[in-house]
Image: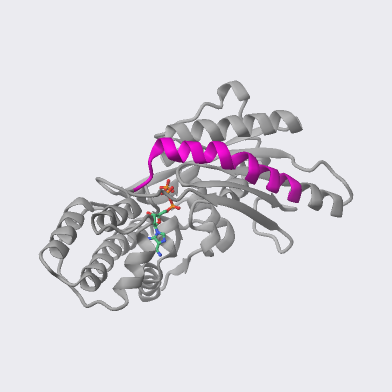
Amino acid sequence: LRILGIEGTAWAASAAVFETTDPTRRTDDERVEIYTDAYEPDSGGIHPREAAEHMHESIPEVVAQARETAREWADERGGDDAIDAVAFSRGPGLGPCLRIVATAARATAQRFDVPLVGVNHMVAHLEIGRHRSEFASPVCLNASGANAHVLGYRNGRYRVLGETMDTGVGNAIDKFTRHLGWSHPGGPKVEARAKDGEFLDLPYVVKGMDFSFSGIMSAAKQAVDSGEAVEDVCFGLQEHVFAMLTEVSERALSLTGSGQLVLGGGVAQNERLREMLASMCEQRGAEFYAPEPRFLRDNAGMIAVLGAKMYEAGDTIAIEDSRIDSNFRPDQVPVTWREEEDW
Ligand code: ATP
């Protein structure tokens, strides 16, 4: 089975090909090749119109690269059809970007005369961790740019157990670095500067299973403006924000009784976040898994992998029903591809 995935919800114009003999589980012979062209704003954060122009220019190129790889793999295997289905991100994301990606996906599916699979981008962020870890029923922490939530599977849906009450975690960090005049994305720069910093007290807001970043970001900006060392603010920011995510993840493990946590999203590339979660899991006797970085940041590989599971389950979509949904929530998705026990 070979699936072509296309992703373009915000900054990553990405296409991938995923080949497997059994999409329901991780196999030794599976392979994923990802081609990504990143949008890098000249100044400030992501401008939706510029990001859409980037998708317009780059999606055809990355799709052509992925198709070429699919063709080579098909030839190696004796010239089967190059791809069995096209999977694409239907949302959530920036509307102008999503529309370009959807158009490209429909055209590619029609050209190859194969089914189309409409994937929820946030569910893909968590399913790639479940797939690669082979955990049966983990709690999932999605720590990405525009989102932050903890999910657990119950009765055929991924339930949002806790989430941000304002901005996504990466966007919150990026707003702070924009205030400092640093270029986008800010997360890796905060991580680098925090290595030379010391602890600084900042607001910490967790309410039940939900959390908020707006207060801590304002306080971090004020701290820098009032002369605190930038390294200390970066260190304090990471300690507080990641402790909030770790606290709610632990509460979700406790609530569900699950002994497994998987991490997803671009912020999950941060070593300190992974270290805190790993240590919390170790103390509870739970297993922890974070996929390799190419599957954490936005990428079409995760879209192709979930697309393969959905295709196998018969969960394809007619072209006329394939409109995008920029606010597509993970709990709106009927989970057709798994049967494991819930908590
Ligand atoms: P979403 O998946 O919710 O649509 P997104 O499209 O913005 O979000 P992702 O690729 O998941 O994208 O994450 C991008 C975010 O990850 C950016 O906000 C960036 O600052 C942050 N990020 C990247 N590397 C790191 C790091 N090492 N530490 C902290 N944050 C990071």
Q: Nearer the viewer, residue 129 or 143?
A: 143
Question: Residue 188 in the image: x percent, y percent?
Answer: 39, 64
Q: Give the range drawn in magenta.
A: 45-69
Q: Say which quarter of the image contains residue 101.
A: top right
> In this figure, what is the number of numbered marks?
0
- Residue 73 % position (x, y): 79, 52
> Which residue is located at x 64 percent, y 43 percent?
61
Q: Which residue lies furthest to the left in this view?
A: 226
Q: Any magenta on residue 232?
A: no
Q: In this view, does 169 lie to the left or right of 50?
A: left
Queried whether the magenta region covers residue 68, the answer comes back as: yes
Residue 235, visible in the rendered structure: yes
Q: Is 220 rendered above or below residue 99?
A: below
In terms of depth relative to the viewer, which is nearer, 124 or 331? 124
Which residue shows up at 48% across the image and 56% down it? Answer: 297
Image: 282 above or below 327: below
Q: Position of residue 167 (x, y in %)?
A: 28, 47
Q: Residue at x 29, y 78 (%)?
A: 196
> Which residue is most to the front?
42
Closer to us: 209 or 6: 6
Give the image location of residue 63, x and y in percent.
Answer: 66, 43
Considering every residue shown, the one lying at the far right of the view is 78
Is any atom of residue 93 visible in this view? Answer: no
Say above or below: 137 vs 289. above
Magenta residues, dominant SS class: helix
Q: In this view, does 24 lie to the left or right of 197?
A: right
Report which quarter residue 277 is drawn in. bottom left
Image quadrant, ligand 1: bottom left
